[in-house]
Amino acid sequence: MRLRIDEDGVRNDVEAAIGKSLTSCLQCSKCGGGCVHAEEFDLTPRQVVESLLDCQDDKVLASRIIWLCGKNCSGCQAVCPVGLPLNEIMATLREVAAARGIEPKYLPPSLTYFKYDHCAKHRREGEASESMVGGEAQLS
C-alpha cells in the first residue's frame, strides 16, 4: 500500500492549534494505557498522533476516537510525559472533520461511557445527588 504524503495536512492544523510539534510525542502509550474509555475507541491517543505524523489524515478523521475522546476527561493529558494537550488535539480534529463534512461514525457509547459521564456529574455536584429534607432523602 502506498501512502499519500500531504505536507499541508491535518498535522499542520493540529500543531498550529496546540502550539507544539507532534514529534515531541514519545510514543510511550501512557495516554491510552490509563484511559478508562479505551474499549470505546478504534485508535488510542498514541495511534492518533502516530497516524498524524505519518500523514494518514483520512484514517484519523474517520476514526471514532476524535468524537469520543477529550470531552469530559483529561486523564491522558495528566500522564503525558511531554504534556501534549490531547483534549485540544481531539477538539481540533473534530473541527477539521466537521469542516470537511465528515460526520461521526460511531455507535452510541456503551453503558460504560454513560456511567463515566454520570460519575463526572457526581464529582461536580457532590457525592449525593439526592436532596436532604428533614433527614430523609428525596430523589429529584
Image (cartoon, helix red, strand yellow):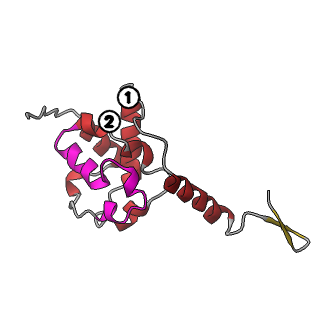
Q: Quadrant of the C terminus?
A: bottom right
- Compared to residue 100, the image places residue 83 above or below, namely below
Residue annotated with mark 2: 62
In the image, which residues are magenta? Answer: 30-56
Residue annotated with mark 1: 102
Q: Quick one: label 2, few (<14), some, or many (20+) residues within 10 Å?
A: some
Q: Residue at x 27, y 36 (%)?
A: 10
CB under 8 Å between callouts 2 and 1?
Answer: yes
Picture quadrant where residue 91 is located: top left
Residue 37 magenta: yes
Furthest toward the right, the residue is 134
The image shows residue 95 at horizontal and vertical percentages of: 41, 35
The image shows residue 105 at horizontal and vertical percentages of: 39, 35
Q: What element carries label 1?
A: loop
Residue 76 seen in the figure? yes
- Compared to residue 12, the image places residue 18 above or below, namely below
Q: What residue type is labelled 2?
A: Ala
Q: Which amino acid does label 1 sit on?
A: Ile
Q: Which residue is drawn at 23% across and 58% down?
A: 25
Q: In this view, does 61 lie to the left or right of 120?
A: left
Indicate which disc residue 27 carries.
none
Q: Residue at x 21, y 45 (%)?
A: 51
